[in-house]
Image (spheres, rainbow, N blue to C red):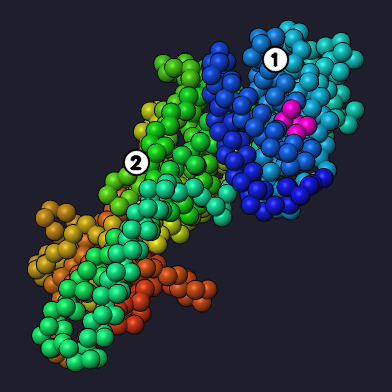
Amino acid sequence: MSNEFSQDPALLQEFLIESEELLEGMNQDLVALEQAPDDTELLNRIFRALHTIKGTSGFLNFDPVVRLSHRAEDVLNTLRRSEVEFSRRIMDALLAARDQLSIMLQDIREGGLKDYALDGLIAELEAVQKPAPAPSRLGDILVAEGVIAPGALQDVLQQQAQSGEIRKIGELLVEKGLASKTDVSNALARQKRPADSVIALTMRVDVRKLDELINLVGELVLERNRLFQLSRELSMGRLEMQDLTEAFSQSTARLSFITEELQAAGLRTRMVPIDTVLRKFPRLVRDVAHNLKKEVDLLVSGEDTELDKTMVEMIGDPLVHLVRNSLDHGLELPDVRESGGKPRKGTIRLEARQEGDQIIISVADDGAGIDPARIAKKAMEKGLVTADRLRTMTTREILDFVFLPGFSTAEKISDLSGRGVGMDVVRSNLTKLNGTIELESKLGAGTTVFLRLPLTLAILPVLLVEVGNEIYALPLRSVVETARIRATELHRFEGSELLHLRGETVPLLRLRQIFKVQYRADEKGSDKVVILGIGEKRIALLVDNLIGQESTVIKPLGSYLHHCSGIAGATISGDGRVRLVLDPADLLASASNSVAQGLTQ
């Protein structure tokens, strides 16, 4: 049902943006309320959010939204009046209502409301408003595992007089058609919540950022007028060459400054707090921890760290996988932790911070850690490495095997993780963002994963290097240093070249050989290298000349060329020529593989 107001695009868009933001806030507030049920202000804030959604939905005649939000609002009212005691069942019902409202808003955004089976959810919301009898242990287990809804469970328990056997109750459920055998055995899978909607086409921008942008555009207009004036004076013969050169030089310098400032200000308007991603994790951790029977504290810091909006939207899935890994494989069960001298409640730390032109996001847990011996054993079983090579590898190099496709040491497969299709996908997604991933782990103490991302994908600072007649661009964030070398510092080992520089030995790659650039008769060997680094890994690139630094816009190569090894994309120089942007991660992997093959031969 709709009216003239619900068909107004501007009004509808404003309603959707406001309501989706309120639901995002509710996701955090409901989880926080479960930890602090006596927090009156938190309870009132959730109530106000639901009341606002209900009121605006009623104005727009979105009746299913009004009906559901009204029932959820009633539950909150009973809590505010202390008519019922806060319980997990109440929280589950409120979270389910919040998720259903999110689905409805997404449907409105995509075309309109549908027919929803709300009777069961509304019945549950009405049921939790009444003081509940003391729960049985059996009921707690079945409801916690999501085998059956609480209301339906009560009916079954009454009919069976609480036989006390979980197996038999599960078979009664199957016989009555309330659950299939798959439902019972895969209870964890049935606990998955619908994904939160993402506002992809709109964003809120601080008005101060827009003011700065408009001021710079004004400066640009003034400089354009100045250039027009110079053009007129030149055409009328009023300017001497010396005066023209001086005026043109000043105008070019001014135009360059304004352009750089405008570029930076434009990028800042696309920056949003990473909190838009991090805010969903309290709810995720809460749900998964309940399913796994684990006790977990989630500590989040750096929520106000800003990142390009496009990148914020793309790092959500990798972070979800890493947090799930920590919950499923990292943290031990409470009894196991206690027997090992640890607190029963585990801790996951999710932190974001800016370092230079990079954003560092870390996911850390204080769980069991990763056993390098198990990783090494699995790698040998898969034929990825020899025993001789393993003896020369560092712990970090061994841990890097977990990023290979299909590599997993999980003893059992779960719906959360352990299928061997996770960490390689995480690294692949980060590579698309020109980011990297590093893993640190200490057996018995926990694991930390570091994600390193550029602030933005739009502008890339690069170092230009020359090889033959070609100029290549290297992302500046991966450049550790540039140096001149002597022939005595180059060594060859088992077919691979190594550079010994200031006590450190790193693999050496010659860009001439990689791109098959032939020497001219009058050319001599080069002595210039660029040291690239990602994390603790280093390689040296031998180049002909170092041109300098500049900021450029990187473009993808397209479907025909995107598989080219060592190339991240391309850019266009000031003279119109195409320059290839090299991929440091690919070059590092190539050098490492070359050395590894030499050691195993």
Quadrant for residue 377, please give it: top left
Q: In this view, does 426 lie to the left or right of 192?
A: left
Q: Is residue 243 visible?
A: yes
Give the image location of residue 546, x and y in percent: 18, 72
The quadrant in which the C terminus is found is bottom left
Q: Check disc 2 and give the amino acid type.
A: Arg
Q: Check disc 1 and give the amino acid type.
A: Thr
Q: Give the range drawn in magenta.
A: 66-70
Q: What residue sits 52% from the left and 73% below the top?
A: 559
Chain-order first, disc 1 or disc 2: 1
- Residue annotated with mark 1: 78
- Residue annotated with mark 2: 353
Above or below, comparing residue 508 to residue 576 in the picture: above
Above or below, comparing residue 277 to residue 564 in the picture: above
Nearest to the observer: residue 356 or residue 418: 356
Q: In this view, does 142 lie to the left or right of 485?
A: right
Q: Can residue 589 be seen in this view?
A: no
Q: What residue sits 36% from the left and 79% below the top?
A: 578
Alpha carbon distance from label 1 to label 2: 41 Å
Nearest to the observer: residue 555 or residue 340: 555
Q: What residue sits 16% from the left and 84% below the top?
A: 244
Nearest to the observer: residue 146 or residue 572: 572
